[in-house]
Image (cartoon, rainbow, N blue to C red):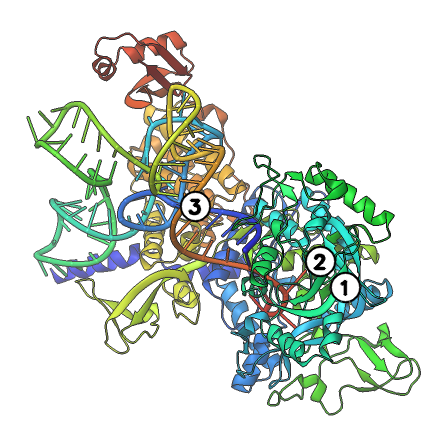
Amino acid sequence: MARRRTARILDHIMTRYNAKETEAKWQQIWSERRVFEVTEDTSRPKYYVLEMFPYPSGRIHMGHVRNYTMGDVVARFKRAQGFNVLHPMGWDSFGLPAENAAFENKVHPAKWTRENVAVMRDQLKSMGLSIDWSRELSTCEPEYYKHEQGMFLDFLEAGLAYRGESWVNWDPIENTVLANEQVIDGRGWRSGAEVEKKLLHQWFFKITQYADELLQGIESLERWPDKVRLMQTNWINRSEGARILFDIVGQDNRLEVFTTRPDTLFGASFCALSPNHPLAQSLAEKDPELASFLIECGKLGTSESALEKAEKQGYDTGLKVAHPFQDGRELPVFVANFVLMEYGAGAIFGCPAHDSRDLEFARKYSLDVIPVVCPPDADPATFQIGQEAFIDDGTIINSAFLDGLDVETAIRRATERLVEINAGEGTVNYRLRDWGVSRQRYWGCPVPVIHCESCGIVPVPKEDLPVTLPEDVSFDGPGNPLDHHPSWKHVDCPSCGKAAIRETDTFDTFIDSSWYFMRFCALSPDSAFARDAVDYWMPVDQYIGGVEHAVLHLLYARFFTRALRDCGYLDVDEPFAGLFTQGMVCHETYRDEEGGWVFPNHVITDEKGRKTSSETGRPVQVGRSEKMSKSRRNVVDPALLLDTYGADAGRLFMMSDSPPERDLEWTESGIEGAWRYVNRLWRLIAEPSAPIADINTEHQTSVSADGDSMLRAVHKTIAAVTSDLERFRFNRAVAHVRELTNQLSEYVSKGAEHDQIRRTVFETVVQLIGPMMPHIAEEFWQMLGHDTLLADAPWPTVDAAYLVDEKVTIAVQIKGKLRGTIEMPRDADNKVVEEAALALDAVRRAMEGEAPKRVIVVPNKIVNVVV
RNA sequence: GCGGGCGUGGCGGAAUUGGUAGACGCGACAGACUUAAAAUCUGUUUCUGGAAACGGAGUGUGGGUUCAAGUCCCGCCGCCCGCACCA
């Protein structure tokens, strides 16, 4: 008895697949045989798959697992389809978190970063990704960023980089610039100090010079999500309008405003300046009340959303400007908190009747609301503005020479008149601003320039690159450690030799990520990249990453590629031919009675479904599922997943269920389901209950009906999975393979005469699931007698003869309601189908003897009877 | 505020793009195996009336177009994301 039980348990253990062992085995074989290392091979079509490289924050998170699994599925699939696939990996390793870690844990950013990279590299390797690790790069290493400094010098020479000024959020206690996200309710996140706006000298890239090209390029990006293309279009936001110059009453000065609606100029009732406008600033010097108003405005921060959500506030400067079209009419000049300095001229004219913000402002300060555009269905004599501004097209009224025109014509006519009277001109304005690249931080690429009192700004000579970061820095004090360093910034001027100061700003890390994909093409030591390698691999055929990068990173990289092109580095316009943006990974949230967040792996569920915390023993409430985040503690560590279930099961779950562009709900039962499938396949294939034909057996010429329907299922599945993978429908691809597995389960024990088909089905299942679960698939491939790698095997081909069935099921409806189905030969005559449908019992019953009014027959699909 | 997206069983989601709503998975229930449990296997599972046969309703909501609407059009409701120094 006892022995039998032991035997059974042993037997059971044997049938559980040992993922850890198998995965390590194949990872080692792939690595030893350098399977995924590639060279430029012009005899084969190339395919460049790239996932957005990670910031080395410490350990990989589920978002990484999802992102890199998707990329790997594509890479392996394309590889099987015969492409020469480049699939590299690197580290976006400069950035603020390393400095925060330095501040909090007293670790040097370099040490912290490099240790994180080492951990995460191991973690990614244990996922079994088909990456060419010989091309690994890390942006914080001088051999990477020295080329970036070279590019900057070339940009400087080409006039694409310049020194300018911009407003920033300034924390007066930390002496540092704050990101918008670090400003919480107008205060610095760490110091709690009220944030000020400050005008800083900064380095800029002239992205606006490429505004039109970037805009037009969007049209060519056919394999980008429409959503992202729209977001970029809106970001650039090209708008045609007019520059208007208002004479300031009693001064020799003019006030420039930008407007898209010069047609509404007769409806103007005020002008408004941005609080950051130079005129507002100079007026404030003599007007303390205005000065304090400007400071109030400064507390709003620099983000557009904050400005537009805030209640409209203004300050009447007492200045008046003359209306350009109406002699003697004067408009008051306000400073208003909703006017952006960065957009247009930093000043507007307000037409309350036809702009909702202007209307809110006018109501508050009792300014005139003069309608000048009359809606098509309103009476011009009585039309008044109520709660809402009228912003649509209509007929111009109350506007002298513009009366009776439509909006479009009136805009043109008004602009012409402005030119005639020398008070303005038509102009194109972009919302897109030049890219400010200076950061007052330590952990970034140093800007390679020197400030000399006699020579001004002097570029560091190229032969002196890289300008490296000093290692001995302290993060205790406020401000930029580079600035505080005792010796680093003091250098001799390369031009005149006198004592000079290094630039202590470092680059925005978006620069690092604007060209890493070119560096992957060839890690040449002497140049940023080998030209012929870039010519071969670029553009990236499939780029995959989070939608949060839809605008900034992707727009900057598109700009940077063009800037490099114009500096003679390469001959590419668009860096990313195809883009896929994946959704986030979410998880339920848990809180105890006191509102404290509880980690999912600390939640215990008893048999009655009650949940308690394993740490405190207190009951836990289940909250809604949200994006995994450390602050809510609703995270599951991928390390645990890889350790418990292995990479294959984890990868499979990542690809199942949720469509890749949508958020994925991480559940324990979901990953268990994937693990069950792994074991089910193992039992089916590794321990088949009936024989499988030898690998060299000829294909059978005649097969039974069972075999025929099995083969039909096989080929339909190949066709479906292939098209699903092409279109990023991973969840459907998985469903199709599982469906085939279900059919296989029924078929698997059929007699020995089925051994040939059994081999075909097994091999197909293994090949189709291979991109998702590469390790176990490779193991099966070997078991099935192959002495070559599945990773090198071609994708299975479809025999079209099996795709078309000779019988079809046709739905029969009465007035659109399903009453039954009929089996008919494919492409049967409509008359025959109609008769068969009307002969159906359910149809006759429903018709109650009446004759059909009309019968619609859609071949091979549906019959709809209208009564 | 501006811009964008989403809404289908108890849950994640499918639906050949206007043609049988609910594939596949999770969960639940029942059965087989087991002393028992786990694992595995076999069923059932949109709701609702009915013993069944067979009906009725149903894709956030209200209208519309059509022989036919989850899918197209118009209006609401709800949720989510982005907005320039987080990467």
Q: Quadrant of residue A114?
A: bottom right
**A233 to the left or right of A147:** left
Q: Residue at x 67, y 81 (%)?
A: A288
Q: Nearer the viewer, residue A623 or A291?
A: A291
Going from N to C along the chain, the mark reached first, 1 or 3, is 1
Q: Secondary structure at mark 1?
A: loop
User: In the rendered image, is residue A787 in sight?
Assistant: no
Q: Secondary structure at mark 3?
A: helix
In this rendered view, identify the residue nearer to me: A94 or A298: A298
Q: Which three-letter amino acid code belongs to the residue tagged 2?
A: Met
Labels 2 and 3: the sequence-earlier one:
2
Residue extending furthest toward the right: A496
Query: Is residue A478 shown above or below A19?
Result: below
What residue is disc 3 on? A731
Residue A16 visible to the viewer: yes
Q: Which x, y percent locates residue A680?
A: 32, 48
Residue under circle 1? Answer: A528
Residue A367 position, x and y percent, is 62, 59
- Mark 1 vs mark 3, CA separation in Å: 39 Å
Chain letter of the residue beneath label 2 in the structure image: A
Q: Are marks 1 and 3 on the same chain?
A: yes
Q: Taking A223 as reference, is A843 left or right?
A: left
